[in-house]
Image (cartoon, rainbow, N blue to C red):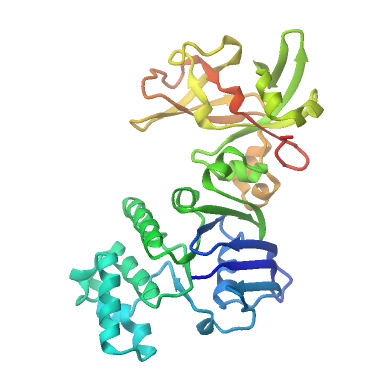
Amino acid sequence: MADVVLEDLNKEYDNGFRAVTDLNLEINEAEFLVMVGPSGCGKSTTLRMIAGLEDISSGTLKIGDRVVNELPPKDRDIAMVFQNYALYPHMSVFDNIAFSLKLARRPKAEIKERVSEVARILELESQLDKRPAHLSGGQRQRVAMGRAIVRRPRVFLLDEPLSNLDAKLRVQMRAEITGLQREVGITTFYVTHDQVEAMTMADRVAVISQGVLQQVDTPMTLFNEPDNIFVAAFIGSPSMNIMEGVLIRTDDGLRLALGSQTLAVPDEVLQQRPALEGYLGRNVAVGVRPKDFEDASVLTDHPSDQRLRASILHTEALGFEIIVYFDMDARPVISQEALELSEEETSAAESSATRVHARFSPTTAVRAGDTIEVAVTVTNAHFFDLETGLAIRD
């Protein structure tokens, strides 16, 4: 096992495109770190630089105590799993897993022992004589992982390994990969565009956008304390609702104006985020997670001055919750990174209304067309500077 350290890492192509910019990141020994971001954000390029499949333009890459910038992939003691499995179709499962050991001319008894151990861990013992064509997608993924870990590498790299699986199998494989990593204890770097994978699998998550690292922390810290608008909107499903608002001091206390409606702001909000004092009377970006809205007829003890009126546009019943959509006449806020990545986001940013998605209790009786009161947990709201996109805290 080894830690992996990226210091001021850059990747610039001959045409001038910068895929990764000044990346500083440490993957601790035995840690499971997931890098997540939208397509084209630089996450796979980062993985390929660690693997030695992409040249590093500048900066330093260390694996353990060695600088490996110039080392070929075979000398870095890493193993990689690709999204297309890359199995040898004419070989059995046993031979696919054993391939690297045979290349290294390990003794036959050792090969058999190590393949058997990996097959036991991955529950492939009954599949060893089969060829990949006779396996399910999940079994092929296990074989690909087995071929990687049988070498006992210092670092394990996974490039969107679940993207070719159906939704049910992805859920199963998330748990299996996480359990496997815990059991073998290999330092693991995993890249994906799926933030649900990142949140459910990682010890820590690194969020990247347009080649620039945005934030690195535990999944729950990213969810509860995003550093900027991009992270706030990217982490969480459904994503955070972010709109323009104004904090106003009135005779009745602090109020948050969201379009034509206002909410009372409890004293503890300023106590937790003292820097907000400097933003009174100024437009800020206000973020509210879907979980922090509720049908007020269900949450009957919620303060009356922390409720909004809303006309329900659409509902989605999921059994354990109901996703509810309504519009607010407050201007939506979208990060500059997201605007540059998506025409859909650009169109939304030009609107004068924010489409809100909320997670209601399954006991709610609301339907499309209803006008209701929506309870808002204002103490959980997030606030961001509109110019910098950074969180307003202390």
Q: Is residue 313 left or right of residue 250?
A: left
- Location of residue 55 in the rendering, given as x and y in whole percent from the top left corner: 64, 78
Residue at x 39%, y 65% (from the top left corner):
184
- Location of residue 306 in the rendering, given as x and y in whole percent from the top left corner: 59, 15
Residue at x 36%, y 84% (from the top left corner):
101
Depth check, front residue: 132 or 174: 174
- Location of residue 270 in the rendering, given as x and y in whole percent from the top left corner: 71, 24
Toward which corner of the image does residue 48 lie, by quadrant?
bottom right
The quarter of the image holding the C terminus is top right
Q: Is residue 253 left or right of residue 62?
A: right
Farthest top residue?
251
Residue at x 53%, y 70% (from the top left corner):
2
Does the image show residue 346? no
Q: Is residue 390 left or right of residue 121?
A: right
Toward which corner of the image does residue 126 lie, by quadrant?
bottom left
Is 49 situated above or below 248? below
Is 393 situated above or below 215? above
Is 302 situated above or below 162? above
Farthest bottom residue?
105
